[in-house]
Amino acid sequence: MLGAAGKHLYEAVQEEYKKAGKKNWQLRKFSKKESAPWIAAVASAKKLLHSKPRQHPALFLLSVVGKEMYEAAQSLYTKPKAKTMKAMKAMKAMKAMK
């Protein structure tokens, strides 16, 4: 189901580009290194799926992977909290002890 949804989205975007006059629109394939986290995420979602009986397994898989994608994207755009002065001094002291 997850793969089918992705394929439908890809084909829909291709059709929109064709309608707009851009005839050739293709995505490059991910390298093995780039696709490894996705494969691991889907495998983990499948483990969660099989841990309990679910009423809608395909919907569960889509929601789990979708949530992960959303949170990963949010972490790219949010700034990490600045460390407090106390924490920075403690780290400096730890480095000095080494």
Image (tube, helix red, strand yellow):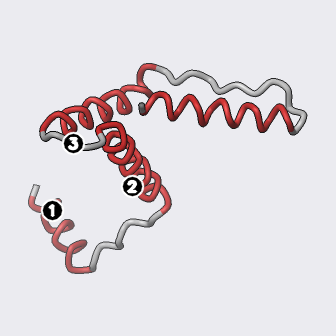
Instruction: Give the CA distance from mark 1 to mark 3.
Output: 54 Å
Of 23 and 19, nearer the camera is: 19
Quarter occupied by residue 41 = top left
Instruction: Give the CA distance from mark 3 to mark 2.
Output: 23 Å
Q: Residue furthest front?
A: 55
**Position of 4 compared to 98: left or right?**
right
- Badge 2: residue crowd in 10 Å (few <14, some 14–19, many ≥20): few
Read off the residue under disc 1: 96
Q: Position of residue 42 (x, y in %)?
A: 32, 32
C-beta proximity under 8 Å, tags 2 and 1: no
Read off the residue under disc 2: 71
What is the three-letter code of the residue carrying label 3?
A: Arg
- Sooner in the amino-acid sequence: mark 3 or mark 2: 3
Residue beneath the point at 20% across and 79% down = 86
Q: Closer to the camera: disc 3 or disc 2?
A: 3
Instruction: Give the CA distance from mark 2 to mark 1.
Output: 36 Å
Q: Residue furthest bottom?
A: 85
In the image, residue 42 sits, relative to residue 90, either above or below, namely above
What is the three-letter code of the residue carrying label 2?
A: Glu
Quarter occupied by residue 61 = top left
Q: Position of residue 63 (x, y in %)?
A: 36, 48
Quarter occupied by residue 65 = top left
What is the three-letter code of the residue carrying label 1?
A: Ala
- Sooner in the amino-acid sequence: mark 2 or mark 1: 2
Read off the residue under disc 3: 54
Residue beneath the point at 37% across and 51% down = 67
Q: Closer to the camera: disc 2 or disc 1?
A: 2
Q: Position of residue 55 (x, y in %)?
A: 25, 43
SS at mark 3 in the image: loop
SS at mark 2 in the image: helix
C-beta proximity under 8 Å, tags 1 and 3: no
